[in-house]
Amino acid sequence: MNVLVLNCGSSTVKFQLIATDLDLIAQNADRRLAKGTIERIGGEAIISLHAEGHESQRLAAPLRDINAAVDFIARWAASPEAGIEEIKSIADIQAVGHRVVHGGEAFRRQRRRSRREQNLGFEHEAVADHTDVLAVFEQLP
């Protein structure tokens, strides 16, 4: 199973593609297929990509929002340029995991964090729900 693991911030996406299955999990032997970051989303984004066994790539592209960034990652992973043997099409990504900073019942939409929240360990400038990222995969062929 190939899993796309996302960590979306307000203008940044970090990702890894992990090949795993129950046996690999039991042996703590998951394999990272690729990793990367997209920064400055909302304008001319700075993109760093690395597929295991290949040279790292660094480029810029206009990406308007988080959904466009995730779309870019999925399409890159399935492209010949990425060279990821296990992923020939977007359908070869069988699962998506997403890191979410959860603010509990009191926080239901994106907003600036308070000093109290900073002291409690919230790591991002905004407590956000990025569940709409999964909608990107519903729209892809």
Image (cartoon, rainbow, N blue to C red):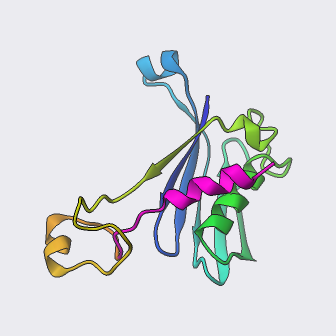
Vertical order, 24 against 15 (above or below): above
- Outermost bottom residue: 43
- Outermost right residue: 80
Residue 39 shown left or right of residue 88 in the figure = left
Region in magenta? 126-141
Query: Horizontal and vertical percent for residue 91?
Result: 75, 38
| Number of numbered tags placed on the structure image | 0
Residue 80 shown left or right of residue 24 in the figure = right
Compare residues 62 and 138 and report the one nearer the observer.
138
Q: Residue at x 59, y 68 (%)?
A: 66
Instruction: Confirm whether residue 27 shows in the render.
Output: no
Residue 115 in which image quadrant: bottom left
Tell me the quadrant of the picture where the N terminus can be found.
top right
Q: Residue at x 52, y 29 (%)?
A: 30
Residue 121 in which image quadrant: bottom left
Q: Residue at x 49, y 57 (%)?
A: 131
Instruction: Confirm whether residue 85 shows in the render.
Output: yes
Asked whether 84 falls inside the magenta stretch, the response is no
Query: Horizontal and vertical percent for residue 9?
Result: 46, 68
Query: Horizontal and vertical percent for residue 118?
Result: 20, 73
Q: Residue at x 72, y 76 (%)?
A: 60
